[in-house]
Image: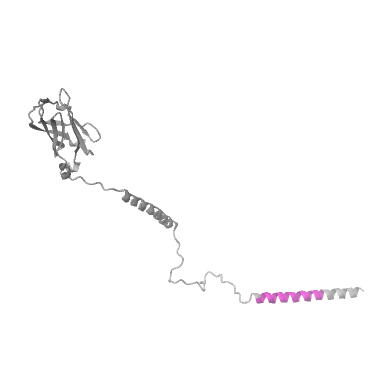
């Protein structure tokens, strides 16, 4: 009985080993066929790569862009468009200021005003050195002589600011004979920066009944006055 059991056990083990060997053989054979045609990659760094894709232009491949260049291009694009827009808006809103022609200014003279048959007239304006000079005339067509105190002559700019002025040649008393008396009103040119117009107001003395007023007397620019 013992011998029979041993033989049976040996036979069973033989069958199992044979079956395992056959299974391993078939598994190895199937795996070999599946991997057939697959080559091991060449990992040797000393060898050049085979089959490197070629570009259309020799020597040119992928180009790396610096971060700074990208930032600069973006800044120029955004700010350039903004500056161009601002420049366009400036051009659209710009209105050219017409230049003052000295001949057009002179064409506005004489300027006059009359009150109580007494006439005051600004005949012309000119530049003499560092002063702006008005040529002034007075005439009395009434029946009574009129006195003046020229310190009462009120000279103002277009912002209603008083200006210093010197009067010369005009009579203290204007006779009632229709005669024309001439004189000048001199204003320092330094007081007329950015002033376009001035006004004159004169009253009689001591009665102060007359109101001789001439407004919007044109003043040429500093550059024109220096010509």
Rendered residue at 83%/74% (across/down): 12
Residue 75 falls in image quadrant:
bottom left
In the depicted structure, whether residue 172 falls above or below residue 63: above
* One can see residue 73 in this view: yes
Direction from residue 195 to residue 123 in the image, left or right: left
Q: At which x and y percent is residue 104?
A: 17, 44
Q: At which x and y percent is residue 46?
A: 52, 70
Please state the extent of the stretch shown in magenta in the rendering: 13-33
Q: Is residue 130 magenta?
A: no
Query: Magenta stretch mostly in which secondary structure?
Result: helix
Rendered residue at 41%/57% (across/down): 73
**Front-most of residues 14 and 117:** 117
Residue 219 falls in image quadrant:
top left
| Count of numbered marks | 0
* One can see residue 226 in this view: no
Direction from residue 85 to residue 15 in the image, left or right: right
Q: Is residue 19 magenta?
A: yes
Rendered residue at 21%/33% (across/down): 156
* Colour mode of the rendering: one colour
Q: At which x and y percent is residue 1?
A: 92, 74
Q: Quadrant of the C terminus?
A: top left
Residue 8 falls in image quadrant:
bottom right
**Front-most of residues 127 and 177:** 177
**Front-most of residues 89 and 13:** 89
Of all residues, the one furthest to the right in this rendering is: 1
Direction from residue 81 to residue 109 in the image, left or right: left
């Amino acid at each position: 009985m013992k011998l029979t059991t041993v033989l049976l056990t040996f036979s069973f083990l033989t069958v199992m080993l044979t079956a395992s060997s056959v299974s391993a053989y078939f598994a190895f054979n199937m795996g070999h066929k599946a991997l057939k045609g697959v080559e091991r990659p060449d990992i040797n760094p000393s060898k050049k790569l085979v089959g490197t894709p070629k570009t259309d232009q020799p020597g040119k491949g992928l180009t790396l862009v610096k971060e700074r260049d990208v930032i600069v291009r973006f800044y120029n694009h955004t700010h350039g468009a903004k500056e161009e827009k601002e420049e366009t808006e400036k051009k659209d809103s710009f209105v050219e200021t017409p230049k003052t022609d000295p001949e057009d200014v002179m064409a506005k003279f004489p300027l006059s005003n009359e009150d109580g048959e007494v006439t005051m007239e600004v005949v012309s304006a000119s530049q003499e050195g560092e002063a702006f000079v008005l040529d002034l005339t007075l005439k009395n067509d009434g029946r009574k002589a009129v006195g003046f105190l020229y310190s009462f002559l009120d000279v103002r700019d277009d912002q209603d600011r008083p200006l210093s002025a010197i009067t010369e040649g005009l009579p203290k008393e204007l006779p009632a004979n229709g005669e024309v008396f001439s004189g000048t009103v001199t204003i320092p040119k330094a007081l007329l920066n950015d002033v376009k117009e001035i006004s004159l107001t004169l009253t009689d003395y001591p009665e102060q009944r007359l109101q001789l007023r001439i407004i919007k007397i044109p003043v040429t620019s500093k550059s024109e006055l220096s010509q």
